[in-house]
Amino acid sequence: MRYRFIFNGIVQGVGFRPTIYKIAISLNLRGFVLNSSDGVVVEIEGKRKDDFLDLLYKNLPPLAKIDSIKKETLPIVGYKEFKILSSKETKKTTFISPDKSICKECIEEMFDKSNRRYLYPFINCTNCGPRYTIIENIPYDRKNTSMKKFKMCNRCYQEYTNPLDRRYHAEPISCFECGPKLRVFGNGLIEFNSEIEKIKFIANKLKEGKIVALKGLGGFHLMCDGTNEEVVKELRIRKKRAKPFALMFKNLESIKKYCFLTKKEEELITSYEKPIVLVKQKKTLKFIADGIDRYGVFLPYTPLHLLLFEFIDFPLVATSANVSGEPIIKDVKELFEKLNGVFDFVLDNDRDIVNSCDDSVVEVALDKLVTIRSARGYAPFSIKTSSKKNILGVGANQKSTISIGFEGGVILSPHIGDLETIDSVEYFKNTIKTFKRLYEFEEDVIICDKHPFYESTKWALSQNKEVIKIQHHFAHALSVMFEHNLKGEFLAFIFDGTGYGDDGSIWGGEVFWVNRSSYKRLHYIKPFKLIGGEKGIKNPANLAVSLIDESLAKNYPNYKLVKSLKNAPFPLTSSMGRVFDVVAFLGGMIERNEYEGYSGLRIEKFYNEKIKEFIDLKVDKEIDFSEVFNFATRYKGEFELVSSVFINTIEDMMIKISKMYNLPVIVGGGVFQNRTLLSKVIKSLNPYFNQKIPLNDGGISVGQVAYGVWNL
Ligand code: ZN
Ligand code: ZN
Ligand code: FE
């Protein structure tokens, strides 16, 4: 008898075939392995064929992901040996692996003096290195990547063509002789005798307190010594940035000097994906994340980063090189055009980044992974399903992503950025083009947000295609349902900053009844006027003073102004994000909203779990937070009390509502990035929420596509 298997999933360009080859040889099996349009086909004959699958699962290469296996038992053919057959033309729907951090074997080789790749900054193998960021077209072959301009030397070619070598068909394979080269720029190109000299030079400049732009896997980082207050402050001024900076540490031990880590956080930090993980501060570093109690930390993930840390023993600020809200910059020309004057030196290289990809950002709430930004290491993120129609979801406007749904499944793009500049919108359109090319995809239907001013919506409507509009918070709920493959009815609490409501007002504190095709708005935060419009978001003072009792409001300097604007035609909102802003302002924790999410982070910092008090809000269709606002005003300055009572009150309100309906609970929207609130709610309501899909607006495109998959 002969077995025939067909494997689907991420099974190409990840060392899948050589693994099968090795296992087949070790079991003395005969037959073949082949990439075909149906997936990876394997046929085996021999006594020990029943051990094959088991061994395969035990030895699965780290980047491979099997989504499905089809097994057939057929009559014997009488194969003489086991062979890797050359690929037939493959269909483009084979999933593309995300980029992965350098693997253990490559690290060992890189620091092994006798190895020919000793200290080689671009070492990689089939288990690690760039993928999505270098791919121009499918199939994933060297000629379809930005490695095509580097002609493999003989020794690399030997490895590349040997099925028993770890670098068999490692498309970005290279070495000192044949691979990419580093380039250092100061005032012009600076010449060195060796690659390691270049890295050493850059390390010295970082020690001297200079700012360096360094090209990584998916784009440039701006880097400087995180312990040097002066240079960190200087970087803030030059980059005009208020948001916290991420820190790259040499190793786990050095992270622990500055942060408290849970076991789960350690696991994520050291995982293959090497995301930025938001963790609790232990030791203060000024100007890194002032006023909040978290750092975004990560470990070196490319050989180059590791080599740099050979000469450095302080944490490095590593922030994406971009203009605020725009995609990460991927080539040196653009770097000089857009950020000239921000950096002092550049460590560039001549391996082109085809698709830029920012760092991923995650956090842990009660031991559960929460994705805030899905990018390097995770994206493109694929979910196995099957869609009858080809559906393109174009997402929201902030934290833009796109998703496609087709026969092969649903695929979420990496984080694109905020669609607020021409370049971001350009990049959004390019991502759509890239996805269409890589997955040979042509949409039948486009699904977009209802917001008429979203750039993604405008783009959708300008295409000559069928367009479906899905309400923003319904899309948040659908995204959760899709990730967990939920069927039936649910009670969804969707709390976020801004989303266009069915009545044209701005929603964001919503309690829905939902199923896969429809929703009902059961409760919402009593709408209030967004005094100052979009600017009101930066200046919660105006909002705040309009929301408290007259007798209290009179004490605020902006009282008169706010009163005069009360009847001006500003939009109404039921946004929970704005409620956070108002409470943080009235409680005295913020003056202005320095950056998105700042008020929530301040409230988290001061949350004290020993304070059990809450305000027993009345739950009508409209939920009135006035009592909370007045409480915050009265106890202004008592940060712990105001924060804790506020968070406790939200939790209590959610519990009360869920008791009214007796349905399984979904939570979603950016407000739940607040892990204090999320952790409490996980305990009390055991809800479903987005974990691998971003739970903020980055997950909207998935929700949109989910609607299409289930309803078209
Ligand atoms: Zn490797
Ligand atoms: Zn070579
Ligand atoms: Fe949202």
Image (cartoon, grey):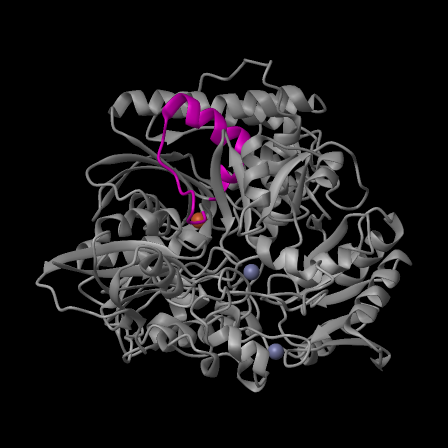
Percent across and percent down for residue 306 are 71, 57
Percent across and percent down for residue 220 are 67, 67
| Up/down of 305 relative to 690, above or below | below
- Most foreground residue, 501 or 233: 233
- Most foreground residue, 500 or 529: 500
In what quadrant of the picture does the C terminus appear? bottom left
Q: Which residues are magenta?
A: 670-694
| Up/down of 271 relative to 681, above or below | below
Quarter of image, ligand 2: bottom right
Residue at x 27% of width, y 22% of height = 660
Q: In the displayed structure, does residue 651 sit left or right of residue 552?
A: left
Magenta run includes residue 680:
yes
Q: In the displayed structure, does residue 68 sit left or right of residue 77?
A: right
Please identify the quarter of the rendering in which residue 542 is found: top right
Residue sitting farthest toward the right: 208
Percent across and percent down for residue 389 are 20, 66
In what quadrant of the picture does the N terminus appear? bottom left
Q: In the displayed structure, does residue 671 sit left or right of residue 221?
A: left
Q: Is residue 135 visible?
A: no
Percent across and percent down for residue 328 are 61, 66
| Up/down of 402 relative to 354, above or below | above
Query: Main SS type for the magenta part?
Result: helix
- Most foreground residue, 284 or 560: 284
Residue at x 84% of width, y 57% of height = 234
| Up/down of 193 relative to 30, above or below | below
Q: Is residue 361 visible?
A: yes
Q: In the displayed structure, does residue 233 sit left or right of residue 508?
A: right
Residue at x 37% of width, y 51% of height = 472
Residue at x 87% of width, y 49% of height = 228
Magenta run includes residue 458:
no
Please identify the quarter of the rendering in which residue 381 is found: bottom left
